Amino acid sequence: MKHITINEYGQFIGITSERLTIKEDGKLIAEYPLNRIKTITIARKGVSLSSNIILQCAMRGIKLFVLDPITHTMACISGGQLHAVSKVRQRQFEFLQSQQTPLLARQFIVGKLKNQRVILNYFTKYLRKKNNYKADICKLAAEQIKDSVYKLERLNIANYSDWRQVILGYEGSSAARYWRTLYEVNLLPECFQGRVGRGARDPINAALNYGYSILSSYIWHCLINSGLEIYQGVLHTQRSGKPSLVLDVMEVYRAWVVDRDVIKLANRLGKAGELTPKLKKELVVSIHKTFASHYQYKGKKVKLEVILQRQIYRLSGCFSGAKNYKPYIFKW
């Protein structure tokens, strides 16, 4: 099953004989059997589509995502073939009124920090072949993040009235160290002056934001499959139009799925001075490839896409009290 991403201005997507077709300037550039498609993501303004594609997606259970990485706007069109049942969401809402909420919220950030540490250790191996000094800087930052995780895990977080701010404080300080270190050891170019979200103009932040938007479509897809309410988050608070639970789950996967690939493209992004269509396409292909790759999970080699879905089912089980949720940590 394929995840299709359309990211070129002026392209048109439609249906011809049970196949998704993508055209540019009236010429057919790609086509895919509808029965082999899992999601379609439109990740660029100026893409047009036939109403037939919307109906076919709804009938076949194909999720259709429309993203704007610049404004962080996201929409999803899905049909009635969903697994949502009222009890799943009811248990989710009840859980979020309990004393277990801060403990689960902490797990998302513990997962994020541990995977940021994995990235630092991953690139330490690369740096060790070229520059021991830079490798040592990277290794030190990884150990400092490990120390932050140790402290966060041992906090009696449920006793804090401002537990969200406490957790986000640990996340913020570790994130600052993580990005600063990647810059100091020249894994990120001069144009990167720190992490910027909405409205970023430098190519590194633009690539990160674009990559995160693609990642969010995978997570949204899996959350819909599990029947959970995406707008009811654990750590991220409710705000109109904000898919808070998507943002919660994303924290664990950002570093390995997106940051790692952007770092690999960093020199070319710096030289180009912008996120060019070619580099954008390469980033999308890399993210899809990462999700199609096999990783160790409970004693077996499993596609990351399957791991993500299983982890979200475990999250659903956590809301009902049937399972414990532990974030997935990558191996370096």
Image: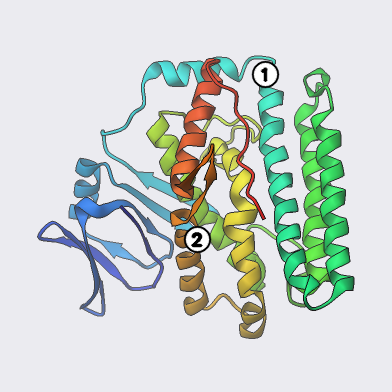
Quadrant of the rendered image containing residue 200: bottom right
Residue lying at the far front of the rendered structure: 299
Q: How is the image coloured?
A: rainbow
Expressed as whole percent of the image width and height from the top left, the position of residue 61 reads 26, 41
Q: Going by the image, does 250 lie left or right of 180?
A: left
Residue hosting label 1: 100
Instruction: Name the residue rendered at 17%, 60% in the picture.
Output: 19
Expressed as whole percent of the image width and height from the top left, the position of residue 55 reads 20, 47
Give the residue type that dot 2 points to.
Answer: Ile
Q: Which mark is residue 287?
A: 2
Q: Nearer the viewer, mark 1 or mark 2?
A: 2
Give the residue type that dot 1 points to.
Answer: Gln
Residue lying at the far left of the rendered structure: 17
Up the image or down, 330 lies above or below 183; here it is: above
Q: Secondary structure at mark 1?
A: loop
Expressed as whole percent of the image width and height from the top left, the position of residue 186 reads 78, 74
Q: Secondary structure at mark 2?
A: helix
Instruction: Name the residue rendered at 62%, 37% in the picture.
Output: 327
Q: Earlier in the sequence, mark 1 or mark 2?
A: 1
